[in-house]
Image: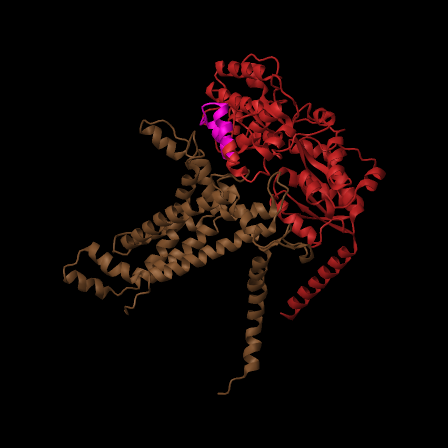
């Protein structure tokens, strides 16, 4: 018994010594929005091991999941022990900017360029470069190329009329044209509104109402109503997320309006590899904007981090070069490094590089006090509850009374 | 024996300190916060600015909060009536000596063991699914057209129905324990006197369960006021008006949401205070209306 006890005590001492030796090395603490087991988490964990082998810096990753975005601000205010974390680049710039590290000098020293659109907005909102994209997103109409081919469609539509022609051809071929989940009705309708009014026009409506007097708003609503009445939505749409978008993977529908993560979601949910394509949301006659949604989950470093350089180096290690490519390939996402290749969605990198001002995620409407009700009304628009665009816009104006 | 006061205080101190720090302090801070403009929940009190009742006026005039309160009332009243009535009915049946009562008790309680996330996902993704859902399979087998169970009009009721399914077992057990505490002599005497089963229920069971009913109403009110998870799972991407409840509104107000960068911890605290007052009011009203039985048994 005494011998056994001695062995255990010696083992504990050795382990303790080992831990002390380990603590002497540099360690960075990384709060991640991914969950263990997700493709992104697996690549990040592997990259962290490779980084440690190369530099000796240990990356201690804490998998916080998607709720990280609600925890992070309080954690930064409380100066929690964090050296690197992820969040939506909009929130990083607009909310967490004051708590984040100015990456400008380190980026210049490392020759980091990234996507100008994200860098510019980071600087605009935070006052300095405060984040590096890890998972860039681009919005638009995602479609099954094979379904288009089966319906004899040779070119992607660029205008609303062409889009309706494409819908008609798909329907004739026995394929439901447009998958639409209720959760994204606001996003699709927002696109339609942006085409007619631009984000500035929508901001004006948000502030003062007057939907019924706005020709663009009435036209946008009417076009959606016509789309629904023509039977161009997938059966059961607007459905409960992700039931409708999954129909593309099941070969029952051809298109969906969303951001590029929809491709990985549908592939994973249905166990298929859809032959994805992307085109910009169609423009409308007399419209004012052809903008497209762009966003990113980005990496940032707390302003108080004592290992900012190591954290920045790891952020670049993960998002550029070999590991950046692996992240893009394994997770079917747009590469965070524009010099890498987008294998899952050809053309996405070029689209992002060419962009100067992204369309926001309904940002001009979702600060309205009645936003929750508005969102339900957008779903109702796709449910066919309004006779025409004028009736819908009158109902919108009623929210301002 | 002489009391050693110092020792008493020493033994009580850890519990009292924990209670003060972890319960009383947050409650007081939340109440104070509700009268200030506070952007961040954990921000310094130096950044707070006195706001009077403005936070309360703000939420009372906010369409999202009003919708969430309407949904809360629907969950509390409709869900409460169905859940408590059904669980009482089942409890009475299962204590009447029917066969396999152990099995039925376990089967009805089972949803409480299953994770609420799994349960809600089953309802959303399978039972209510438009294409292959259980309900639409039944509907089409009966020769009717498929129904969109999760349309904007129906979603709240679908969520309440699913929540009732998940809650009945818990309240059933409470009622069963109450019924089993009533002496059987009373029922035997009533049977000898020729009282029917329904008379026995209304004249013996129900009056003697007043205390239990009060407890279940308070529990249900707390459940409805703190309703969060089911609302989140029935609106998986972003909060939706059809399923928003006060706690979800509070959460979005304090922490922001997808693309929403504005945060208002002061208004969130006001929502918390309003919910607490509702629970206290319901408790007081229930105490007044359902006076405890003075019967001894």
User: Residue B275: horizontal and vertical position, in percent?
Assistant: 49, 53
Q: What colouring does the structure picture have?
A: by chain
User: Residue B70: horizontal and vertical position, in percent?
Assistant: 44, 44
Residue sitting at the far bottom? B1
Asked whether B170 or A400 is in front, the reply is A400
Q: Residue at x 52, y 32 (%)?
A: A397
Residue A239 lies within the magenta run = no
Asked whether A182 or A111 is in front, the reply is A182
Quarter containing the N terminus of chain A: bottom right
Asked whether the viewer can see residue A337, the reply is yes
Asked whether B203 or A366 is in front, the reply is A366
Asked whether, in this view, residue A361 is left or right of residue B193, the answer is right
Asked whether the viewer can see residue A238, the reply is no
Colour of chain B as rendered: brown
Asked whether, in this view, residue A8 is left or right of residue B131, the answer is right
Residue sitting at the far right? A109
Q: Residue at x 56, y 58 (%)?
A: B31
Asked whether B60 or B93 is in front, the reply is B60
Instruction: From the rendered image, report the letter of the chain displayed in red.
Output: A
Q: Residue at x 21, y 62 (%)?
A: B187
In the rendered view, tell whether residue B153 sits above or below residue B77. Answer: above
Magenta-colored span: A375-396
In the rendered view, tell whether residue B233 sits above or below residue A345. Answer: below
User: Residue B294: horizontal and vertical position, in percent?
Assistant: 29, 68
| Tag count | 0
User: Residue A181: horizontal and vertical position, in percent?
Assistant: 51, 30
The rendered magenta stretch, by its main secondary structure, is classed as: helix
Residue A393 lies within the magenta run = yes
């Amino acid at each position: 018994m005494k011998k056994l006890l001695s062995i255990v005590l010696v083992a504990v001492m050795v382990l303790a010594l080992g831990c002390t030796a380990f603590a002497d090395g540099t360690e960075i603490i990384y709060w991640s929005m991914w969950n263990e087991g997700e493709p992104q988490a697996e690549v990040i964990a592997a990259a962290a091991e490779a980084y440690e082998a190369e530099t000796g810096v240990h990356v201690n990753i804490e998998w916080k999941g998607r709720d990280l975005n609600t925890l992070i601000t309080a954690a930064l205010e409380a100066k929690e022990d964090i050296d690197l974390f992820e969040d939506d680049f909009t929130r990083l710039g607009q909310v967490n900017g004051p708590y984040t590290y100015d990456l400008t000098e380190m980026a210049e020293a490392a020759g980091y360029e990234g996507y100008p659109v994200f860098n510019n907005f980071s600087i605009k909102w935070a006052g300095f470069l405060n984040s590096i994209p890890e998972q860039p997103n681009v919005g638009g109409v995602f479609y099954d190329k094979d379904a288009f081919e089966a319906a004899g469609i040779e070119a992607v539509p660029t205008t609303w009329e062409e889009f309706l022609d494409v819908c008609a051809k798909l329907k004739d071929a026995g394929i439901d044209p447009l998958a639409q989940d209720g959760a994204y009705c606001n996003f699709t309708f927002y696109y339609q509104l942006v085409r007619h009014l631009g984000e500035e026009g929508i901001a004006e409506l948000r502030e003062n109402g007057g939907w019924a007097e706005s020709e663009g708003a009435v036209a946008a609503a009417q076009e959606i109503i016509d789309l629904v009445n023509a039977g161009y939505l997938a059966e059961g749409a607007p459905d409960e997320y992700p039931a409708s978008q999954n129909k593309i993977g099941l070969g029952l529908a051809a298109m969906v309006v969303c951001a590029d993560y929809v491709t990985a979601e549908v592939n994973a949910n249905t166990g298929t590899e859809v032959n994805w394509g992307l085109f910009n949301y169609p423009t409308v006659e007399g419209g004012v904007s052809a903008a497209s949604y762009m966003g990113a989950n980005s990496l940032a470093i707390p302003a108080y981090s004592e290992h900012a350089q190591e954290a920045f180096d790891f952020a670049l290690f993960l998002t550029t070069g070999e590991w950046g490519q692996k992240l893009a390939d394994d997770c079917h996402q747009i590469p965070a490094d524009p010099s890498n290749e987008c294998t899952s969605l050809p053309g996405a990198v070029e689209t992002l590089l060419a962009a100067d001002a992204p369309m926001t995620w309904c940002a001009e409407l979702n600060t309205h006090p009645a936003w929750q009700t508005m969102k339900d009304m957008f779903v109702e628009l796709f449910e066919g509850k309004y006779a025409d665009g004028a009736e819908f816009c009158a109902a919108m104006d009623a929210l301002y009374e | 024996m002489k009391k050693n006061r110092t020792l008493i205080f020493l033994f009580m101190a850890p519990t009292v300190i924990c209670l003060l720090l972890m319960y009383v302090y947050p409650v007081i801070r939340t109440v104070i916060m509700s009268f200030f403009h506070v952007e961040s929940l954990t921000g310094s009190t130096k950044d707070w600015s006195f706001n009077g009742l403005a936070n309360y006026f703000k939420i009372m005039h906010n369409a999202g909060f009003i919708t969430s309160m309407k949904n809360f009332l629907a969950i509390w009243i409709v869900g409460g009536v169905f859940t408590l009535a059904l669980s009482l009915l089942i409890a009475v049946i299962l204590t009447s000596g029917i066969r396999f009562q152990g099995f039925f008790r376990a089967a009805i309680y089972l949803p409480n063991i299953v994770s609420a996330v799994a349960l809600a996902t089953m309802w959303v993704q399978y039972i209510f699914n438009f294409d292959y859902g259980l309900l639409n399979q039944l509907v089409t087998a009966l020769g009717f057209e498929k129904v969109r169970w999760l349309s904007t009009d129906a979603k709240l009721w679908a969520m309440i129905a699913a929540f009732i399914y998940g809650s009945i077992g818990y309240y059933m057990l409470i009622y069963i324990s109450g019924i089993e505490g009533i002496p059987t002599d009373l029922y035997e005497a009533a049977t000898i006197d020729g009282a029917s089963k329904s008379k026995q229920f209304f004249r013996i069971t129900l009056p003697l369960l007043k205390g239990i009913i009060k407890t279940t109403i308070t529990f249900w009110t707390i459940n409805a006021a703190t309703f969060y998870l089911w609302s989140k799972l029935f609106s998986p991407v972003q909060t939706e008006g059809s399923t928003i409840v006060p706690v979800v509104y509070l959460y979005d107000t304090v922490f922001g949401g997808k693309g929403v960068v504005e945060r208002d911890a002061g208004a969130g605290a006001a929502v918390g205070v309003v919910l607490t007052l509702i629970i206290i009011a319901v408790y007081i009203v229930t105490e007044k209306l359902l006076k405890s039985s003075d019967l001894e048994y």
